[in-house]
């Protein structure tokens, strides 16, 4: 079996690009165009629990990306998709709608342990593999002023749970159990295992 020379990365996350580069994997971006409603894939279904949600969304992203590759007539190569969600109990905390929403999320996380679930899927037209990383993160109790300053930095926007573990939020995180890279958005160990199944030398 010939080793693939690159993987398509169907993600706009700069962190995921950085983590793939850390693994030494060449990639090309395979992003949706204006005709695709990428946000619609991330809608939470009624009664859906965090684990089922993040795995379902990642699977949908992979199917959409494989269709995109075929539609654009691109050279065949494995496609990598990932989705990260933050869960407080059974409650899914997605990306904040605005500053007030971010403030509310951070106030809920303050002083509590929550889970960060990152699902990864790699696939071709004939073969698909999936994995899931679950980590726990504990925030120290945050004052209203601390939350306001962090939200004002703009960092929470576009981030699941309204924070970035690799950014300023690190100053408020007391304890992490699990995969740091998984919390960032791409668990290195699990992703490397999947890549090997597609012939990558990792």
Image (spheres, rainbow, N blue to C red):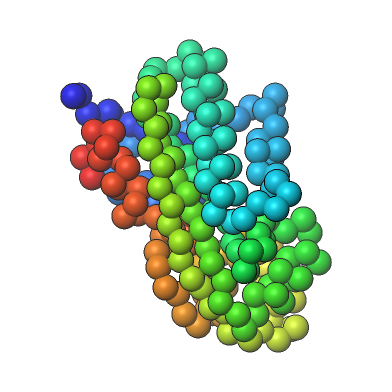
190, 154: nearer the viewer: 190
Residue 65 in the image, given as x and y percentages of width and height: 52, 29
23, 61: nearer the viewer: 61
Left or right of 103 on screen, residue 163: left
Residue 139 falls in image quadrant: bottom right
Position above or below: 193 against 79: below
Q: Residue at x 66, y 84 (%)?
A: 142
Residue 132 visible: yes
Residue 55 in the image, given as x and y percentages of width and height: 52, 46
Residue 113 falls in image quadrant: bottom right
Residue 91 in the image, given as x and y percentages of width and height: 67, 63
Q: Residue at x 63, y 64 (%)?
A: 90
Q: Residue at x 53, y 29 (%)?
A: 63
Residue 16 visible: no
Q: Residue at x 39, y 64 (%)?
A: 179
Residue reaching furthest to the right: 100
Residue 103 falls in image quadrant: bottom right
33, 41: nearer the viewer: 41
Image quarter (top left, top right, bottom left or bottom right) of the N terminus: top left
Residue 57 in the image, given as x and y percentages of width and height: 58, 42
Image quarter (top left, top right, bottom left or bottom right) of the C terminus: top left
Q: How many marks?
A: 0
Position above or below: 141 against 119: below
């Amino acid at each position: 079996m010939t080793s693939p020379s690159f993987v398509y990365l169907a993600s706009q996350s700069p962190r995921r690009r950085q983590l793939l580069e850390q693994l030494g994997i060449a990639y090309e971006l395979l992003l949706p165009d204006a005709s695709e409603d990428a946000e619609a894939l991330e809608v939470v279904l009624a009664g859906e629990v965090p684990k089922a949600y993040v795995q379902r969304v990642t699977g949908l992203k992979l199917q959409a990306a494989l269709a995109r590759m075929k539609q654009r007539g691109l050279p065949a190569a494995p496609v990598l998709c990932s989705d990260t969600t933050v869960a407080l109990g059974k409650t899914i905390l997605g990306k904040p709608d605005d500053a007030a929403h971010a403030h509310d999320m951070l106030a809920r996380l303050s002083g509590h342990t929550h889970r960060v679930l990152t699902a990864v899927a790699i696939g071709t037209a004939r073969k698909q593999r999936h994995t899931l990383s679950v980590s726990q993160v504990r925030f120290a109790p945050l004052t209203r002023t601390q939350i306001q300053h962090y939200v004002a930095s703009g960092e929470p926007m576009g981030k699941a749970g309204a924070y970035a573990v690799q950014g300023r939020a690190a100053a408020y995180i007391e304890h992490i159990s699990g995969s740091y890279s998984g919390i960032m958005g791409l668990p290195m160990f699990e992703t490397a295992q999947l890549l090997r199944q597609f012939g990558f030398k990792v």
